[in-house]
Image (cartoon, rainbow, N blue to C red):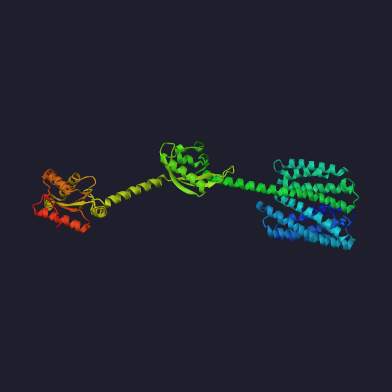
């Protein structure tokens, strides 16, 4: 196939030339070979180069070229092709990736301009030496014909190699390509057969073909213009015969005309290809985002600055019971009233600063209960290009986590309470008493607030334990603790230090207030305690100490203990007040 294409293109181009040894107006063979090589592995290039040389040589001989001239010009063509193909392959290894097409276009054009200049200089030297053609005219003719052919046909060959039969069999393409090309051929034939300078009328048709079919349309359209123009001019028709020009001048004008068509259409095709690539990339990005959002376990929402939801992912139905359509719009009513203002402020902060943040709040489920969610909010550009932007929220259900955290906090508080409470009586234990006593003495030192301390134990408690058992003793301790609590204010502290030792801490103690508490306790002791149907009289001895001036806890406790021993020595079932001497 390559041999047939190269031979046919060479013979047709040479036949349309004005005479033996002259150069064609447009040379397409090099473009075919370059596109062919770039579509295949580099290791296969030598074989295809040999085939192209073997195909072009007899075509030139049939067109009337001398053997030496034909071989030399064919070698110049190979130099040009290999230079362009090597540069493109080294700079853009993957020419099939649309992302590289803009870069490929720039590199390919630059390589073509340089390679055609080098090969043109060689070919002009051959034409000048063997046929006596002026070097400058030969170089210009070669350069223009090969640049146009390389740029147009190489691109077409690459597209055809990639698309193959789909180029014509894709839905709607065959008829559309045939119709637009038919229009271009009809217009071009008309403007090249008329003697009037109306060549510009073919450009709109060429632009139409380029816009509809891009590089394929450009290549086929420029080739059609070249063939029609060269054929009509060769036969003596067309506006190129209006001026007193020789064959070289007419060829130069035709090349300029074809180059103008390329300059109009190729940038258009590159821009359209880049636009299509970006659009495809955007569609793919949107598809991936939609897939991730639709299949994510988290609920994802897009929210405008005014709080209106523009998109809600399907996972919201499982999380909140509401369908995505029901959650669109402004639905602040489903946010817990206690969290609503905080969440509105959080959204405003994200929009103002652009910094993402994480918030925890409650959303009402369709069934009525509230779901705890953790939502990450970040600002994204608005669709309308506004400065405010929109918000993207990614929320997950953390109701179980919150329940566990609340349970742990409750357990922590309970453990803290147990650590400061007596397990048997529920009163404060020694740890809590020591902490409260230290606080009371610090207030006394700072503000002069007086403190009273009552230390007491149950009279003959060992007899109760030994005579009635420890269960009875525990019951007595619990009942005694309730009597103490009934005798004090809510702000006073009742504590069990261990065994049958109890204390009462009275803060902001007025004179005589501790004695009043002691009298209530002693009076309550007159009532027998019924333990296992056995009435027991439980009395207590109480020692009272006042702290009107700063004092340390050890000294203060020692004073109350001294008063307690004094009460015991006085016969028990009473109280004594320590007198500071």
Displayed quadrant of residue 531:
top left
Does 5 sit left or right of 334 as displayed? right
Q: Please name whichever residue, 266 or 451, is drawn nearer the observer in this view of the structure.
A: 451
Classify residue 146 by image quadrant.
Answer: bottom right
User: How far from the left and from the top, in percent, is residue 387?
Assistant: 57, 45
Q: Residue at x 51, y 46 (%)?
A: 352
Q: Position of residue 145 (x, y in %)?
A: 81, 54
- Closer to the camera, 343 or 272? 343
Q: How many marks?
A: 0
Instruction: Write the residue at 68% across / 48% down.
Output: 273
Q: Which quadrant, please, contains the C terminus?
A: bottom left
- Name the spot of residue 375 as percent of width and height, x first: 47, 46
Residue at the farthest left position: 571
Is residue 284 at all visible to an observer of this figure? yes
Q: Is residue 58 left or right of residue 458?
A: right
Q: Residue furthest right?
A: 244
Q: Looking at the picture, how far across and down is residue 470, in whole percent?
A: 16, 51
- Residue 50 seen from this side: no
Residue lying at 74% horizontally and 41% vertically, measured from the top left:
176
Nearest the eye: 575 or 38: 575
């Amino acid at each position: 196939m390559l041999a047939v294409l190269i031979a046919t293109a060479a013979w047709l181009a040479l036949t349309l030339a004005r005479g033996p040894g002259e150069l064609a107006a447009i040379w397409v063979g090099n473009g075919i070979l370059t596109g062919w090589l770039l579509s295949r592995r580099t290791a296969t290039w030598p074989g295809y180069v040999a085939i192209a040389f073997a195909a072009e040589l007899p075509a030139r001989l049939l067109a009337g070229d001398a053997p030496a001239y034909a071989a030399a010009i064919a070698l110049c063509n190979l130099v040009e092709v290999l230079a362009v193909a090597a540069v493109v392959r080294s700079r853009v290894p993957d020419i099939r990736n649309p992302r590289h097409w803009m870069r490929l276009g720039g590199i390919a054009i630059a390589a073509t301009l340089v390679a055609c200049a080098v090969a043109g200089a060689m070919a002009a030297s051959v034409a000048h030496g063997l046929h006596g053609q002026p070097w400058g005219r030969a170089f210009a003719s070669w350069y223009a014909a090969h640049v146009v052919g390389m740029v147009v046909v190489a691109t077409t060959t690459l597209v055809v190699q990639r698309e193959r039969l789909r180029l014509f069999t894709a839905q709607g393409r065959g008829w559309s390509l045939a119709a637009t090309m038919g229009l271009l051929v009809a217009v071009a034939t008309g403007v090249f057969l008329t003697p009037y300078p109306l060549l510009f009328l073919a450009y709109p048709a060429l632009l139409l073909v380029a816009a509809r079919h891009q590089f394929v349309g450009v290549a086929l359209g420029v080739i059609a213009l070249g063939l029609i123009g060269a054929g009509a001019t060769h036969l003596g028709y067309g506006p190129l015969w209006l001026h007193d020009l020789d064959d070289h001048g007419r060829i130069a004008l035709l090349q300029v005309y074809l180059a103008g068509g390329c300059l109009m259409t190729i940038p258009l095709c590159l821009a359209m290809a880049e636009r299509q690539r970006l659009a495809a990339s955007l569609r793919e990005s949107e598809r991936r985002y939609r897939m991730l959002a639709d299949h994510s376990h988290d609920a994802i929402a897009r929210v405008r600055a005014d709080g209106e939801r523009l998109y809600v992912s399907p996972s919201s139905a499982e999380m909140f019971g509401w369908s995505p359509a029901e959650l669109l719009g402004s639905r602040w009513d489903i946010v817990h009233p206690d969290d609503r203002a905080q969440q509105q402020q959080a959204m405003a902060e994200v929009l103002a600063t652009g910094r993402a943040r994480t918030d925890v709040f409650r959303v009402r489920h369709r069934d009525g209960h509230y779901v705890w969610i953790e939502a990450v909010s970040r600002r994204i550009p608005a669709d309308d290009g506004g400065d405010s932007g929109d918000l993207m929220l990614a929320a997950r259900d953390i109701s179980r986590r919150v329940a566990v955290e609340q349970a742990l906090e409750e357990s922590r508080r309970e453990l803290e309470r147990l650590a400061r409470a007596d397990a048997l009586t529920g009163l404060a234990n020694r740890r809590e008493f020591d902490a409260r006593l230290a606080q009371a003495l610090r207030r006394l030192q700072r503000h002069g607030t007086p403190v009273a301390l009552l230390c007491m134990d149950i009279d003959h408690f060992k007899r109760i334990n030994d005579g009635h058992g420890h269960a009875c003793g525990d019951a007595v301790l619990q009942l005694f603790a309730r009597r103490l609590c009934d005798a004090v204010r809510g702000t006073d502290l009742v504590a069990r230090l261990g065994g049958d030792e109890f204390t009462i801490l009275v803060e902001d103690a007025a004179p005589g207030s501790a004695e009043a508490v002691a009298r209530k306790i002693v009076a309550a002791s007159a009532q027998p305690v019924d333990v296992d149907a056995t009435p027991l009289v439980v009395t207590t001895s109480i020692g009272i100490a006042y702290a009107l001036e700063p004092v340390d806890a050890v000294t203060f406790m020692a004073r109350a203990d001294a008063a307690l021993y004094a009460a015991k020595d006085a016969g028990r079932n009473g109280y004594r007040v320590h007198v500071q001497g």
